Image (cartoon, grey):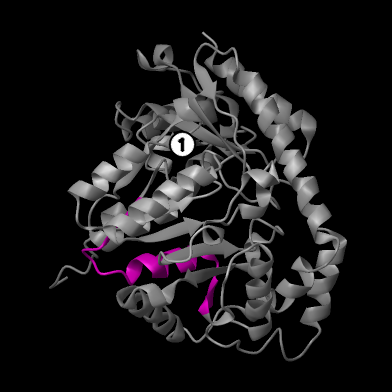
Amino acid sequence: MRRNIVHPGADELHYEIRGIVDFAEALAETGIAITWENIGDPIMKGEQVPLWIREIIADEVRNNVFSYAYSPTKGLQAARDWLAVDRSKQGTELKAENILFFNGLGDAINKAYTWLHPQARVLGPNPAYPTHSAVEAAHAHSPHLTYQLDPKNHWLPDMAQIRHMVQTNESITALLMINPDNPTGTVYPRALLEEFIAIAKEYKLFLIADEIYANLTHHQPDFVSLGAITTDVPMIIMRGLSKEIPWPGSRCGWLEFYNLESDENFARYAKSIEEAKMTEVCSTTLPQSVLPKILDDPRYRPHLEKRRKKYAARAAEAVAAFAQHPCLDAVLPKGAFYQAITFSDRMLEKPFVAAAANLRAQALLDIALEAIPKSSFDKRFCHQLLAATGVCTVPLTTGFNSSTPGFRITLLEEDDATFTKTLQVISDFVTP
């Protein structure tokens, strides 16, 4: 090409959650049965959306207007009104006009970072969900700035470290929390959220809270929405339907803007995101049109409670399975449906080597390992685990921008025996 056409942030775009799929599919052709533990899709793991929810959606599809026409750019008024009222019931003041719908939360995250000034940085967690870390890094043409989540402290951050990073780096304009967290499942306690708010006030930052798993906290009273405890700090709360109903194929997420009046610059930034959305006309209409009917149905809360209990039980089983393991460590997650597993110091002392399940798989594994640096312990481990057992996991370092090596599995498996067997397979694979 006569000019370089590659975006300067292109090298920062990584999504290991799906990146490992090609290797897994190649292994499947050698006869290895794959256990997909890489993607947080409840439907693909066998969960059935309740019939009453499907009936609501089916009835709406039969409507020739609302499910097929454009929606307003911000989203259907009925959906935004319902969300505003729901937030007020939870003690949060939110105006319907300050809600903006997108084609999935990934689309919303992308817009939020893309329309930041290139020199404005967002300080986010480490490990981090890769859409946040990759897109923020790409927008800034530089690696994502992170604060450390500590597995020895229930995967909670060190607020002193965050304060120091904000003090010493004036490009940091916002602080990101993923609460409940993906991939660790940690739930931020109220006192910690209040420390984030205090830092934002002191240094004139805005806050971003990805709360897509807000209604999937295993012990619901533990969760506090950031919007419920501050009235004077500019912030964005991110939510969606994909994990909660669950309906990942709906691609329905939204941004909630709070305290716009507190900062003129933040208000203009929020407006720019809306204007960018306007160039796309609107987001998908159908999920917006059924949102109030589903979430307001008296059967919805029991539906959520049933799911929360299942994930809590899965989490407890996973932690128990590795509690006495000499090489693996697991912290009990309190929300979402993931389990982050890290390696003991003993495990990291020397390279890990394991054979694949068959000769063809070994040949594929050898090629794959040649391309993975020896310093990438967990990525090499995940490829060997996959080639030997068929269990497909995601490494924390390359998959979640983590300083702590390990891997993530899901708590989504519908069949009890299959879930127990998967944990046993992983445990046996690593046992010295």
Where does the N terminus fall, quadrant-wise?
bottom left
Sort mark 1 into few (<14), some (14-19) or many (20+) by Cα contacts within 10 Å: some
| Left or right: residue 142 compared with residue 304 | left
Can residue 274 be seen?
yes
Give the amino acid at mark 1: Leu
Residue at 53% x, 49% y: name it: 179
Q: Position of residue 57 (x, y in %)?
A: 78, 73
Please tell me whether residue 179 is drawn above or below residue 53 in the rendered image. above
Q: How many marks?
A: 1
Is residue 113 shown in magenta?
yes
**Residue 425 relative to residue 140: left or right:** right
Nearest the camera: 282 or 373?
Answer: 282
Q: Residue at x 48, y 71 (%)?
A: 257
Residue 372 drawn at (x, y percent): 33, 33
Q: Is residue 363 above or below residue 270?
A: above
- Where residue 412 sits in the image (x, y, percent)? 68, 42
Place of residue 61 in the rendered image (x, y in percent of width and height, measured from the top left) = 77, 80
Does the magenta-highlighted stretch encompass residue 111?
yes
Secondary structure at badge 1 equals: strand
**Against 49, is 72 above or below?**
below
Q: Which residues are magenta?
A: 98-123
In the orientation shown, which residue stands out farthest toward the top?
Answer: 432
Residue at position x 32%, y 78% from top? 264
Q: Residue furthest left?
A: 2
Quarter-wise, where is residue 173 in the image? bottom left
Q: Quadrant of residue 202?
A: bottom left
Asked whether the viewer can see residue 137, the reply is no
The residue to which callout 1 is attached is 156
